[in-house]
Image (cartoon, rainbow, N blue to C red):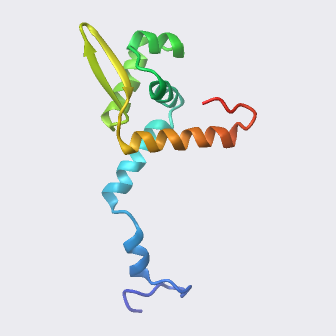
Amino acid sequence: MNCSSLPHNHGHSRDAIIKTMPNEEKIFAVSQAIKQLSDPSRLRIFLLLCHYEECVLNIADITGMSSPAVSHHLRQLKSIGLICSKRVGKEVYYHRAENALAYTLYNMIRKLIKITCPKNNAD
C-alpha cells in the first residue's frame, strides 16, 4: 500500500485529507477552549461577560456562587483567552475578549441554545 492510499478506497487521497486537517497544536487549543466551556458555571459566566462587564462580587451574586469559586472560573477562562480584565482603582472588571475564538464560541453557544431550547430563545 503506498503512503497516499487508504485501506478502503472511497475516492479520497489520504494526503489530501490530512492537508485539510488542522495541526495538533490547533486541535489542542480548540479542545481546551471547549473543555473550559463544558463546565456549566464557566459557560454561564462566559455568557454573562459576553453581554456585561462585571466585577467578581457582582458575578458571584448573579450566579449564586461564592467569590472564590467565581475567581477560580475567571482564571480558567482568562488563561485560554476567552475573557479579559481591567483594573479601575481597586476594582477589577471582566468582559469577553475581543478575539475570533471568544466571538466564534459565543455565537456557536447562542445557536446551540436556540437549537436545544426552542421555546426559550433568550440570548
Residue positioned most to the right: 119
**Which residue corresponds to the image point at 42% horizontal and 19% vertical from the top-left?**
70
Residue positioned most to the top: 90
**Which residue corresponds to the image point at 41% horizontal and 79% vertical from the top-left?**
16
Q: Is residue 4 above or below residue 84?
A: below
Residue 88 seen in the figure: yes
**Residue 39 location (% of width, % of height):** 50, 33
Q: Using the rendered view, name the quadrant where residue 101 is placed.
A: top left
Q: Quadrant of the N terminus?
A: bottom left
**Which residue corresponds to the image point at 38% horizontal and 56% vertical from the top-left?**
27
Total number of numbered labels?
Answer: 0
**Residue 123 location (% of width, % of height):** 60, 30
Q: Is residue 87 above or below residue 48?
A: above
Q: Nearer the viewer, residue 10 or 3?
A: 10
Residue 34 seen in the figure: no
**Residue 82 location (% of width, % of height):** 37, 35
Q: Is residue 9 above or below residue 53?
A: below
Q: Is residue 19 above or below residue 86?
A: below
**Which residue corresponds to the image point at 40% horizontal and 49% vertical from the top-left?**
30
**Residue 92 location (% of width, % of height):** 30, 15
Q: Is residue 111 left or right of residue 79?
A: right
